[in-house]
Image (spheres, rainbow, N blue to C red):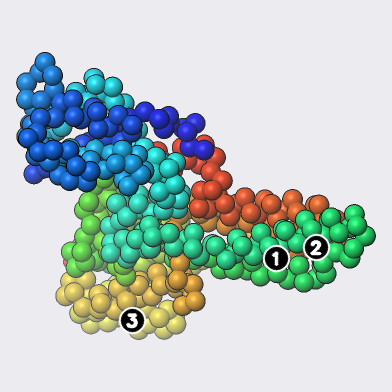
Amino acid sequence: MPDKVYPVDDTIVAVSTPHGRGGIGVIRLSGPDAQTLVERSFRSSEPFEDRRARYGVFHPAGDEALDRVVVTFFKAPHSYTGEDVAEISAHGNPLILNMITSALVSGGARRAGAGEFTLRALAHGKMDLAQAEAIRDFIDAQTQTQARAAMLQMDGALSKRMHPEKEALVGVIAELEAGIDFAEDEIEPPEPKRGADRIATIGRNLAALANTFQYGRLLGKGLCLAIAGKPNVGKSSLFNRLVSNDRAIVTEFPGTTRDVLTETVEIGGVPVRFADTAGVRDVLDTVEALGVSRTLATVAEADLTLVVLDSSRQLDDDDRAVLATVEDRPHLVVINKEDLPAQWEESNGWNAVRVSALAGTGLDQLEREITAYINEGLPSDSETFVITNERQQEALKVAVDKLECAAAALTERVPHEMVLLDLYAALSAVGELTGEVATDDILDRIFSTFCIGK
Ligand code: GDP
């Protein structure tokens, strides 16, 4: 199936460690010629043995010795890709790693594309598509909660979770197919109400799983938090407090399609990034400097907005304007400057959090409120799996939709041939989830988000 995207019968090579200098850098080869290609340039006094690290010199014929390296072979099928794999641990100097890679390319290896090693693992049945995606998510994880969710998926949790639903669906399909045969033999087809109930139950289970994406989306992509308020209420001060108080995530992802994450902090296990991070300090004075429309745009892009009010000054129309912009959006009211004498009392049933960005008080409570918002979407205890990517949610939604149509059609005694069309469409969507029915488009989309060498 994936062989239309990349050829899967040649030998590929890539540097698998991040670009830059380090103690070691690893070059990985996979394919039928992995061993031959490496052995041609590898001089070692130690005998070849599968899965055994050997020390030696990488010295291409007709060239000078490039580095002292450790080479490990993994014979097919007991390797990451399911093919013969060689790993060369050289010193972590990009120049040397590139020279070794180029020597291997001259020898006949092809430079691997993004995610191609994992794609091969998929092609050789070492994992399913959901597990491949989980590997990418695991490598990209920025919080322990994200890593834990990805780890579950790497172990095949989604496929296991889907198994009973798929079995049930196949069961219904089989019965209806048989019903069509019965009809020819003038035997009573199965009772429509019972079939419709069974289909509806599968649909409900899949819908429950799809709904976990509310939390899974925040877990995967992070929460986008906006801070709104008129000038001088303390937005920048609050922002600085949040960024310095929490573990700030300043990881960059060179070579990936992800945005560079700078002002991102971890709250409640999910990455929280601030809307308008490009110069957040300059654009926070949204109301006055940039007008209400800018506030609106920022708030619209955010998952949650903190509306900051100043308790040491009277509430005025500017405050009310900001409050009006968030009225219909998820927001928390933060009453700042509680260290100063209050000029007004909260009387609007806002359930506001009182803080002092200057003194640092109330921030724990504010974080608890943000965490509570994040956890609102937490799945029930009975649902242990969380859908973290949109592709999976889309596939589930299609399945749920088709199942609903099928159940309704069956109740209305629409001919089984028609009902079966919907059921097969649902089955195909379920298959897409774990990659049994993966089109080239889907594979292309997924693997373009991988790094080279993965
Ligand atoms: P912004 O314009 O909303 O970003 O407000 P700033 O964060 O720049 O704060 C405006 C002024 O209020 C600064 O002089 C801050 O030091 C002060 N300020 C901010 N938070 C507090 C607070 O909790 N208590 C007191 N007393 N002053 C504060």
How dense is the environment of label 2, judged by Cα within 10 Å: few (below 14), some, or many (20 and up)? many
Question: What residue is rendered at 55% in x and 62% in y?
Answer: 163
Q: Which residue is mark 1?
A: 199
Figure check: 108 above or below 124: above
Q: Which residue is mark 2?
A: 410
Question: What residue is rendered at 11% in x and 15% in y?
Answer: 62
Position in image of residue 243 (x %, y %) = 22, 62
Relative horizontal placement of residue 432, taking residue 150 as reference (left or right): right
Amino acid type of the residue that numbered disc 1 sits on in the rendered structure: Ile
Relative horizontal placement of residue 224, taking residue 36 as reference (left or right): right
Amino acid type of the residue that numbered disc 2 sits on in the rendered structure: Leu
Figure check: 1 above or below 323: above
Q: Is residue 364 visible?
A: yes
Position in image of residue 292 (x %, y %) = 42, 55
How dense is the environment of label 1, judged by Cα within 10 Å: few (below 14), some, or many (20 and up)? many
In the image, 349 versus 34, the foreground residue is: 34
The answer to whether mark 1 and mark 2 are in CB contact below 8 A is yes
N-terminal of the pair, mark 3 or mark 1, is 1
Position in image of residue 126 (x %, y %) = 40, 48
Q: Which residue is mark 3?
A: 344
